Each structure stands twice: as C-alpha cells, then as structure tokens.
Amino acid sequence: MRKQTWVCLVGWVAATAPVASVVASGSEERYEFSRVLMGVPFKITLYAADAPSANRAADAAYDRIAELNAIFSDYDSDSESMRLCAASRPGTPVVVSPELMFVLSRSLALSESSGGAFDVTVGPLVKLWRRAGRQRRLPADKALQEARQRVGYRLVRLDCDAGSVELLSRKMRLDFGGIAKGYAADEALRVLKRHGCGSALINAGGDVVAGDPPRGQPRGWRIGIAPVDQPEAAPKRFLRIANAAVATSGDAFQFVEIGGVRYSHILDPHTGLGLTISSSVTVIAPDGITADSLASAVSVLGSKPGMALVEITTGTAALFVEMTDASPRSSESSRFTRYLEREE
C-alpha cells in the first residue's frame, strides 16, 4: 500500500483570551502556560477547577508534545524519523511507531490530493536552504539537482499491515515542519480533555487548536488574524472557533533576500526553490494536523488551485492574501465567512 508527503509554514495567528481574563462563569478558573518545544512556544490556555488540576493537565500535555518531538524532529539525529532515514533503503522497510505511521499516511494522502505541493521528503532541499539563508547565497546548481533527486513522495512506501516504512532512494531526509506541530497540538488537546480540561486552547507558534468554548463564550475562542502587510500590528479581523483549528502559512517573518530576490522559507518541492510570491494563507479545519499541512500546501499551489483544494476538503475554509505592488489582494473560500466574528 502506497501513500505520499511535505511542507513549511509561517505567518502570525494571534489567539486571544475570552473576555473573562481570570475567572469564567461557574467554579472554573483560567490558567496559562508556555514552554518552548519543537522550536516554537507552545502556549496553553485552559480552564480548571483549581491550580493543581491545571498544572497536572498542562504537564501531561507538554510531556506528550516532547514525546512527539522525539519522533519527528529533524534536528535530533536520534529522533525516530531521522533513524528511519538512516536505516531504510530500497528493500529494507523499517517498523515505525503508530504516530509516525499515522502522520506519514496523512502526509502522503495530502501529497496526492495536492499534486505534490506538500511533500515531507523535501528534507534535502530544506537543509540546502537553511545553509543558503545563513550564507545569503543560492544553493549551487549541482547541489540543488542532487537534492531534488532524493525528493519525491512516491519514494515512500507504507505497509500499514506490517506497520513499516520503506524509503525507495538512498540518503532521503524527511521533514515534518509543515505538519508535526499541528498534530502535536491535537495530541496536547486530547491529553487535556482526558484530564477534564476540555475548555482549552493550544497555540503552537501560530498553529492554533481549540477545544470546547470557554464558559460564557458559546461562539468559541476568539482568534485574531494579523494584516499581511503589517504582520506585527494588532489584528483587525477575528474568527470564532471551537473544537477546530486555525493555521497560517506565509513569509512575513521567515524569508531571505538573495540577489535582490525575496525567497520564502516555504519551498516548492517541484522546483526546489523558495517561493518568491509573498503571501499569507489562513486555514480553518477540524483539527490541527489538517490546518497546518493544508495551509502549507495552499501556499505552494497559489490562490486559484489552492482554494480549489480547500473547497473539496471536508470541513475546511481558507483566506488567501497575496502581496502585490499596489496592495494586498485577498480571496476567501466559500465556507470562510461562517467563522468570521461579526460586529454586534
């Protein structure tokens, strides 16, 4: 059984607290936590009966995120995904954890539906561009060509019955930068709910996963979307979500200028190059893994094909904003307006 993968993300989604900043209606109080994991701040807001309950729930959620980081990190040579890359080769499948199998399956499915715009095998290209960003110099043509030969979601073969993964080319390198944080936020919310904290919000560096609405806020959590032309400005548009997720992908903060050309940190797996069209894509989805990965795929596809993919993806909505010489140009999917906060 075969399936396929990749991506990157950026932009800024601000998760704002409900109106009641300290005490919700009833006996539950609001608690906030923040730790840096997976290279980004994971901020947790939750409602609990007391501080000990809140601390136990948050600690368990952070422990789960750390477990997942040990699976998906491409900075840790001993992570499960990097050990897979080192061990697997044509004819040598490797048995992997259920978590790695699940995320690879979801990744490869999106690779198929997006025509390869999302591809987790893009790791060799990501490594080249990290160096290019530090040196402010484009990758050499030969190095780029060699890296591209090791990229392609069809080079990943899954055997779901055996729970194994086979990489069909040597020196492949997986990169879960466009999907793992969303999945980790989903898992953190599941842990919080098991600890009785269903009313919670996780913000994983811009990937926002919301649980049940805060007490007294039946329309859900309030999520701000920063203007793409002023990413550090206060949001002027807001969403309301509950038991759903929001992710934003864009190049507002992560890009490099080389030879007068602005290259995004988001790579097109087909060309091996960073995107040169400045844009911001905000996706709403039933869960973080979908929102995170789909936002990156839409960024690579561009406005029209990207929004077409959103329209056929169940339970999703998107806002695509592209910077032009004159002003930002935006388009919305048909389901996007249902999540917008309307002025009272």
Image (tube, rainbow, N blue to C red):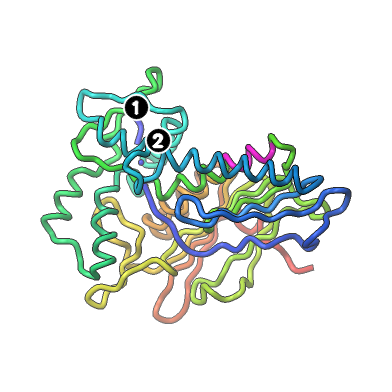
| Gap between marks 2 and 1 measured at Cα | 8 Å
Residue at label 2?
104
- Dominant secondary structure (helix, strand or loop) of the stretch shown in magenta: helix
Q: Residue at x 61, y 42 (%)?
A: 61
**Residue 244 magenta-drawn?**
no
Q: Reading the chain from its start, which is encountered first: label 2 or label 1?
A: 2
Relative vertical location of residue 121 with respect to residue 159 in this rendering, above or below: below
Give the crowd class for mark 2: few <14, some 14-19, many >=20 residues within 10 Å. many
Q: Quadrant of residue 315?
A: top right
**Residue at the extreme front of the image, as rendered:** 52
Residue 287: x and y in percent read 57, 43
Residue 112: x and y in percent read 36, 39
Q: Residue at x 31, y 25 (%)?
A: 94
For the record, the magenta segment spans 187-193
Residue at label 1?
158
Relative vertical location of residue 242 with respect to residue 156 in this rendering, above or below: below
Give the crowd class for mark 1: few <14, some 14-19, many >=20 residues within 10 Å. many
Q: Amino acid at mark 2?
A: Leu
Q: Answer whether residue 263 is visible to the viewer in this image.
A: yes
Q: Is residue 78 left or right of residue 298?
A: left
**Residue at the extreme right of the image, as rendered:** 26
Determine the secondary structure under disc 2: helix
**Residue at the extreme left of the image, as rendered:** 142
Q: Residue at x 31, y 70 (%)?
A: 256
Which quadrant would the C terminus be assigned to in this image? bottom right
The residue lying toward the viewer, choosing from 78 and 295, is 78
Residue 55: x and y in percent read 69, 46
Determine the secondary structure under disc 1: strand
Q: Are marks 2 and 1 in contact (CB under 8 Å)?
A: yes
Q: Quadrant of residue 97?
A: top left
Q: Residue at x 69, y 41 (%)?
A: 56
